[in-house]
Image (tube, rainbow, N blue to C red):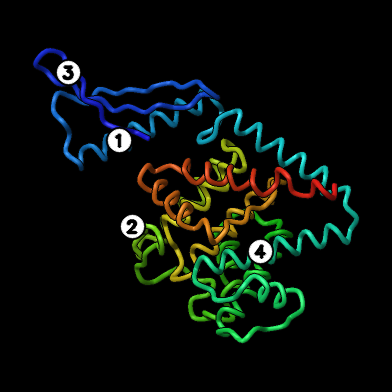
Amino acid sequence: MVYLVESRRGQKAYFYLVENVKLSSGKRKQFRKYVGLQRPSETRLEILSGNFKKKIEGEKQRLFGYHYLLPDEIKKIDGINSSFLNRYFVLNPVEREQFDKNFVNVFVYNSNSIEGSTLTPKEVELLLQEDIAPNRPLEDVLEAKGAQKTLEYIKQAKEELNEKFLLKLHEIYFKETKPFIAGKFKTKDNLVRGASFDTSPAKYVLVDMQNYFKDYEKLKKQLHPLELAAWAHWKLEKIHPFQDGNGRIGRIIMNYVLNKNKYQMIDIKTKEKQKYFKALTKCDKENSAEALARLLVKRFEKQYKHSLTKLG
């Protein structure tokens, strides 16, 4: 995190922007930038910090080859993913199907619960696997089914991430509950529920989304898949292109990126939603997906490091 430091030499005060970057376990590199003899205003400090952060990101990419994660973190994630796949593919077809269905159940429950769904984990399981509808609001029931269809769609998708594909995902998810906005970009300004940052005004959404897809094409050649998944999710939340359902589609896109690159999909737990919202807010403040990428590293490790060890 970038912070301001005052250094005194005699009667004079010198102000610097500083960030300590972790290189590996127990090693750090400090970046400093002199910003003058006067403490900058809050507005000026925000601009200077943003520019300094961008410069550091370039230096980190030169040092590590990635933007957000360290080489040992990348190595750990790759190892966990590879080890899990080895255990997964020795399962018989029935066991693999059971594992896949369980992920869908928990992902649908948590992703919709984060947004206020009233369905319990067991009700979601019975609905998705046995088609037994609970006595709950119809919208919650239909959106659980919509989430299931959308998740299954991305698991088989061959398309690249573009406007047509993104709108298709939103349509699949919400066509039964929000037909007037399903598969369409927003026409009114909106906010991020649970996080405190501004989103793109409706009149700029088309341009911002065009830039989003261009940036994605560039970054997918530079970032590790988990980093790219974090960026794709955070940046979509920052734009907030849909009138409703942005968080749910953002988590779908995150998993689309992981699945497309042969990494396991991540389930963000409802009980961890405050950490998740704080990570998104920090991403906005620093104009970087690093905070979300680090959260995903922890979730990935917790979810897959020991998964199937009793069966594999």
Report the Cα–Cα distance between label 1 and label 3.
21 Å
Q: Is label 4 in a helix, a strand or a loop?
A: helix
- The amino acid marked with disc number 1 is Ser
The answer to whether mark 1 and mark 3 are in CB contact below 8 A is no
In the rendered image, the residue lying farthest to the front is: 310
Report the Cα–Cα distance between label 4 and label 3.
55 Å
Report the Cα–Cα distance between label 1 and label 4.
39 Å
Residue 198 numbered tag: 2
Task: Give the quarter of the image for residue 137.
Answer: bottom right
Task: Give the quarter of the image for residue 79.
Answer: top right
For disc 4, the neighbor class at 10 Å (few under 14, some 14 to 19, many from 20) is some
Residue 106 numbered tag: 4
Q: Is residue 171 left or right of residue 19?
A: right
- Observer-side mark, 1 or 4, equals 4
Percent position of residue 87, x then y: 82, 45
Please name whichever residue, 305 or 32, is drawn nearer the observer in this view of the structure: 305
- The amino acid marked with disc number 2 is Asp
- The amino acid marked with disc number 3 is Arg
Ranked by sequence position, the earlier of labels 1 and 3 is 3
Report the Cα–Cα distance between label 2 and label 1.
18 Å
Residue at x-position 48% and y-position 40% = 290
- Residue where numbered disc 3 is placed: 8
- Residue where numbered disc 1 is placed: 49
Rendered view: 52 above or below 294: above
Ranked by sequence position, the earlier of labels 1 and 4 is 1
Percent position of residue 308, x then y: 79, 49
- Observer-side mark, 1 or 3, equals 3
